Image: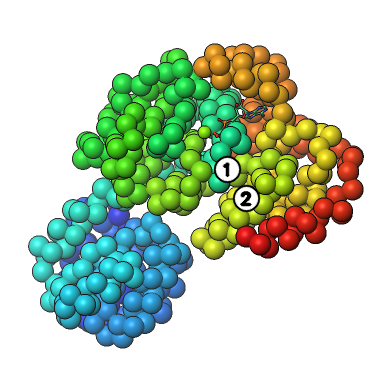
Amino acid sequence: MSEKKKISILIIDGDESSKNTFTNYFEQNSLTEIIGIYSDLMDGYNAVIEKKPAIVLIDISENSDLALELIHKISMQHRSCIIFVSSYESSSNTIIKAMRAGAREFIVKPIQVEDLNIALEKTKMLINIDQGDGQGCKVFTIFSNKGGIGKTSVATNLAMSLTELTGKKVALVDLNLQLGDVTTFLDITPAFDISYVVNNLNRIDESFLFSTLERYKNKNLYVLADPPYLEQAEEISADQINTVLNTLKSVFSYIIIDTGVNFDSKTIPALDIADNILLISMVNLPCIRNTQRCLDLFNRLGYESEKIKLIVNRYLPGDEIRVEDVEDVLGHSIYWKIPNNYLTMMSAINKGIPVSAVDASSPLNRNFVELAALLSNTILNKESKDMQSSQKTKNLFDFSKIKHFIQKLIQKN
Ligand SMILES: Nc1ncnc2c1ncn2[C@@H]1O[C@H](COP(=O)(O)OP(=O)(O)O)[C@@H](O)[C@H]1O
Ligand SMILES: [Mg+2]
């Protein structure tokens, strides 16, 4: 691992003596660096959105209504940012309001160094202090709000293709905490699982991860499995998942995250951290409707449209509904199509091996390799695109007849 990067701090406080205390404290701390100090709330807020600090300190003693509103906005728009609030006013009512708006720590003024120590110590583990390495890591979260659509099939085979194609270290994380089946798809019985990792967060570093993640058949693919017992899954918090994912980022070149069907608090960190969400769908009405719901929600979560890569699984060139019309209804282009190949896929699943081990030359395996190439910016780009565009075959069905029906269905939801 390269030299650790410091935790970036941004301060928004109009009070000169507090600013001095913060500056002395964070400049002397070898783990932190100040990336901005602002007296004006709006200037500070704009800087947070632009600079994305790991921690922001906001004073709410003056103009507390606006300060709380901006804290709420920051917690929505830059979710990984940890917010420390400070105030001369420390009634329980004020503390509750600050926490509800999204603050993680409340520091009573005048500032005591001991309080800053405690707040920093408590939150240090939540921050990716190895951002330098993490920048080189790409995270792909496989999602669909419908089960049985092929998420785990895509996650395992894409992870395998990325490993073989790039030769880099790939982590495959099963965040379908209650019903995960990555271990079944790869026929492995890991000694440790995510529950063990979150219970040892104080030990989490590169060597700990390599000794706890299950290495797959001596390849550069490492699996972080779901916990064996439902109650263990219950105990894992969103913050812990965030810490684990951020630490993985500093160690691996690619992270593939398989998910369940729910938009629960434990899935959100995986969606937030993703460079790309691979939203899996199929070309049929219920799937299109659910995909539309997902796209709406992603929009409300503030994700850029380019972050979402729509993938049609089990694609059949002669499908009644054309993919162009699906794109039209969803207002989102289809990034990739994976062919329907039930026999090859089932054979892989039943044997507990990836598709590449069943039949490396099958169109299904070639498709996964090409998808991996596209996502990792490795060669094959042109051929992949050509292959995808050649899949756009003639429509066999007059889609205009059912288009209004799909739109009505979508509006209803
Ligand atoms: N491209 C494909 N072609 C044919 N069958 C597929 C394909 N992708 C997935 N399947 C089948 O779909 C079923 C559900 O896949 P799975 O990956 O478990 O979905 P999910 O994780 O979304 O619940 C499996 O039985 C698998 O064989
Ligand atoms: Mg699954």
Q: How many labels does the image show?
A: 2
- Residue 136: x and y in percent read 47, 41
Up-down relation of residue 24 to residue 38 (above or below): above
The 10 Å Cα crowd at callout 1, few under 14, some 14 to 19, many 20 or more, is some
Asked whether the beta carbons under mark 1 and mark 2 sit within 8 Å of each other, the answer is: yes
Residue 234 visible? The answer is yes
* Residue pointed to by mark 1: 146
- Residue 296: x and y in percent read 60, 59
Q: On the rendered structure, is 202 left or right of 226?
A: left
Residue 269 visible? The answer is no
State how far apart marks 1 and 2 are (Cα).
7 Å
Residue type at mark 2: give it: Asn
Say which of 212 and 34 sits in front.
212
Q: On the rendered structure, is 168 left or right of 215?
A: right
Which circle's residue, 1 or 2, is located before the other in the chain? 1
The residue that appears at 42% across and 70% down in the rendered structure is 73
Q: Looking at the rendered structure, which numbered label has been put on residue 173?
A: none
Q: On the rendered structure, is 103 left or right of 275?
A: left
- Quarter of the figure with residue 408: bottom right
Specify whether tag 1 is near ligand 1 (CB below 8 Å).
Answer: yes
Q: Looking at the rendered structure, which numbered label has been put on residue 290?
A: 2
Up-down relation of residue 327 to residue 340 (above or below): below
Quarter holding the N terminus? top left
Say which of 299 and 145 sits in front.
145
For ligand 1, the image quadrant comes to top right
- Quarter of the figure with residue 37: bottom left
The residue that appears at 28% across and 28% down in the rendered structure is 207
Label 1: state its secondary structure.
Answer: loop
- Residue 353: x and y in percent read 54, 17
Residue type at mark 1: give it: Lys
